[in-house]
Image (spheres, grey):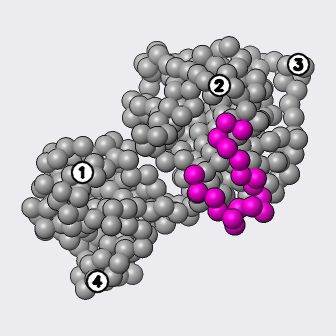
């Protein structure tokens, strides 16, 4: 069956695998645009069977959903794990199936979090700052510790959190975790406990939970005061899980020792943009960027060749299944 799909938010790295799909599936017609799906671009989807989307900006305008339905489109396939950009009231109102790609590479994100944690644990930020000052001494303030001496606390033990726990366990760390669902398969490398116990006992606190009303701001002033003064916060999930103002205050007061952030609240203001000087950044990001004990990556934890390929191919596979009358592998709102 001919499958005609428009993929919004296309990037050159993903386009490689879209071109390969078109080559390997001669009956399909997969077209792309680098534009995001908005009320202004939704008309581009005319004469397509489905749309695939990758973007961080919310799709809140009801007109987008109404117009997709009027064009006969019944499936919006996200090429991401997160689906908080979707307004499900509108998606359900216009009978629009939403799918995602929940496991394009849990290992990629787990490894990125470990990289940030090791950067901070071994105090490379301090060494980098010294290097820029042409200072190659080894001050006592930069003495560090080894991972096997540490307790790693993980909030959210889904695919990514579980991969994270397994990696830290393999390195010799004690791993404790909290999730509303207990997966017995994880018991070989993580000890389940309650949320507060994880917060209070973790030397490295790694967040891997979805963003919703119950988790927004889950790490704030109270939690920072309860954390160890030498603890590290690693957020690879969603920026609004952490109260940014409270994080900055905790870092300044030395309530925690550092933070590795692949996501930020309101990150659309800075991520995927280039600035001429630091003063162009929002004030809170300016403060974080100046701190040698903070490392920020632009929502790139997933960014490996394996993950990029899986994001494109798994999204298209679910579209093909639905058009062929099969159940999607990764439905979100069925």
The structure residue drawn at horizontal position 57% and vertical position 52%, both measured from the top left corner, is 180
Residue assigned mark 3 = 139
Residue assigned mark 2 = 224
**Magenta stretch: includes residue 181:** yes
Foreground mark, 4 or 3, reads: 4
Cα distance in 3D space between marks 2 and 3 = 27 Å
Residue 32 position in % (x across, y down): 28, 61
- Which mark is first along the chain, 2 or 4? 2
The structure residue drawn at horizontal position 56% and vertical position 39%, both measured from the top left corner, is 262
Cα distance in 3D space between marks 4 and 3 = 65 Å
Q: Secondary structure at mark 2?
A: helix
Give residue 205's quadrant in the image: top right
Foreground mark, 1 or 4, reads: 1
Residue assigned mark 1 = 89
Q: Which residues are magenta?
A: 180-197
- Residue 290 seen in render: no
Cα distance in 3D space between marks 2 and 1 = 35 Å
**Magenta stretch: includes residue 306:** no
Q: Are marks 2 and 3 in contact (CB under 8 Å)?
A: no
- Which mark is first along the chain, 3 or 4? 3
Crowd around label 3: few <14 · some 14–19 · many ≥20 (10 Å): few
Residue assigned mark 4 = 324
């Amino acid at each position: 069956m001919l499958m005609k799909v428009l993929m919004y938010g296309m990037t050159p790295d993903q386009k490689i695998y879209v071109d390969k799909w078109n080559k390997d599936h001669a009956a399909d017609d997969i077209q792309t645009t680098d534009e995001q799906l908005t009320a202004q671009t939704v008309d581009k989807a005319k004469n397509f069977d489905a749309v695939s989307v990758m973007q961080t900006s919310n799709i809140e305008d009801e007109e987008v959903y109404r117009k997709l339905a009027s064009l006969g489109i019944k499936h919006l396939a996200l090429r991401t794990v997160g689906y908080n950009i979707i307004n499900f009231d509108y998606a359900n109102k216009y009978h629009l199936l939403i799918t995602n790609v929940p496991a394009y590479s849990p290992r990629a994100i787990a490894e990125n979090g470990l990289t940030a944690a090791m950067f901070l644990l071994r105090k490379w930020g301090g060494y980098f700052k010294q290097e820029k000052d042409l200072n190659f001494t080894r001050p006592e303030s930069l003495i560090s510790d080894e991972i096997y001496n540490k307790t790693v606390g993980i909030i959210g033990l889904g695919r990514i959190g579980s991969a994270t726990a397994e990696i830290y366990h393999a390195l010799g760390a004690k791993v404790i975790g909290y999730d509303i669902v207990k997966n017995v398969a994880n018991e070989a490398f993580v000890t389940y406990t309650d949320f507060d116990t994880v917060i209070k006992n973790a030397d490295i606190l790694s967040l891997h939970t979805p963003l919703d009303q119950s988790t927004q701001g889950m790490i704030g002033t109270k939690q920072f005061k309860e954390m160890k003064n030498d603890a590290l916060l690693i957020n690879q999930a969603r920026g609004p899980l952490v109260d940014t103002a409270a994080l900055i205050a905790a870092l300044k007061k030395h309530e925690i020792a550092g933070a590795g952030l692949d996501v930020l609240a309101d990150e659309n203001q800075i991520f995927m943009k280039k600035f001429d000087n630091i003063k162009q950044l929002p004030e809170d990001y300016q403060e974080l960027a100046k701190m040698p004990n903070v490392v920020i990556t632009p929502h790139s934890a997933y960014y490996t060749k394996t993950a990029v390929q899986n994001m494109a191919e798994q999204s298209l596979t679910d579209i093909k299944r639905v058009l062929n009358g099969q159940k999607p592998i990764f439905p979100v709102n069925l």
